[in-house]
Image (cartoon, helix red, strand yellow):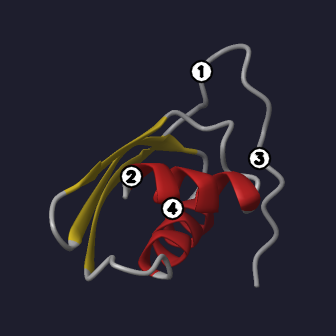
């Protein structure tokens, strides 16, 4: 299931962030760093839309992306 979530985030152009995904029979736990509150919310929305995810535990922190990674193509809805 974590792989399905990772593919969904990649399709949403969020794969360049350092996001750790854990999944346990319904809840998905997200950890890592994004650049803004909007991106944090967007990652949570994408994750919640994956079939089988019943709850999202969003532990993403705000901060700079690691050196060498490009910014994701995020546009608010």
Q: Which comes sooner in the sequence, label 1 or label 3?
A: 1
In what quadrant of the picture does the N terminus appear?
bottom left
Q: Residue furthest left?
A: 25
Distance from Cα at disc 3 to Cα at disc 2: 19 Å
Q: Which comes sooner in the sequence, label 4 or label 3?
A: 4
Residue in front for this viewpoint, 64 or 46: 46
Decide: marks 3, 2 in contact (CB < 8 A)?
Answer: no
Judged left or right of residue 72, residue 20 is left
**How far across and down, in percent of the image, does residue 19 sit?**
46, 41
Residue in front for this viewpoint, 25 or 14: 25
Quarter of the image holding residue 71? top right
Q: Which mark is residue 72?
A: 3
**How far across and down, in percent of the image, does residue 55 sit?**
25, 78
Q: Of tags 2 and 4, which is closer to the observer?
A: 2
**How far across and down, in percent of the image, does residue 30 sit?**
34, 53
Density class for disc 2 (Cα within 10 Å; few <14, some 14-19, many ≥20) is some
Residue occupied by mark 2: 2
Residue occupied by mark 1: 66
Distance from Cα at disc 2 to Cα at disc 4: 17 Å
**How far across and down, in percent of the image, does residue 23 sit?**
25, 56
Residue occupied by mark 4: 40
Q: Which comes sooner in the sequence, label 2 or label 1?
A: 2
Q: Which comes sooner in the sequence, label 4 or label 1?
A: 4
Judged left or right of residue 66, residue 72 is right
User: Which secondary structure, mark 4?
Assistant: helix
Q: Going 53% across and 50% down the picture, which residue do you hit? A: 6
| Whether residue 36 is situated above or below residue 27 in the rendered picture | above
Distance from Cα at disc 1 to Cα at disc 3: 12 Å
Q: Of tags 2 and 1, which is closer to the observer?
A: 2
């Amino acid at each position: 299931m974590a792989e399905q979530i990772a593919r969904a985030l990649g399709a949403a152009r969020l794969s360049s962030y350092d996001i750790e995904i854990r999944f346990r029979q319904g809840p998905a736990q997200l950890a890592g760093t994004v650049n803004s509150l909007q991106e944090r919310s967007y990652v949570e929305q994408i994750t919640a839309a994956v079939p089988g995810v019943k709850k999202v535990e969003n532990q993403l922190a705000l901060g700079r992306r690691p050196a060498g990674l490009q910014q994701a193509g995020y546009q608010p809805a």
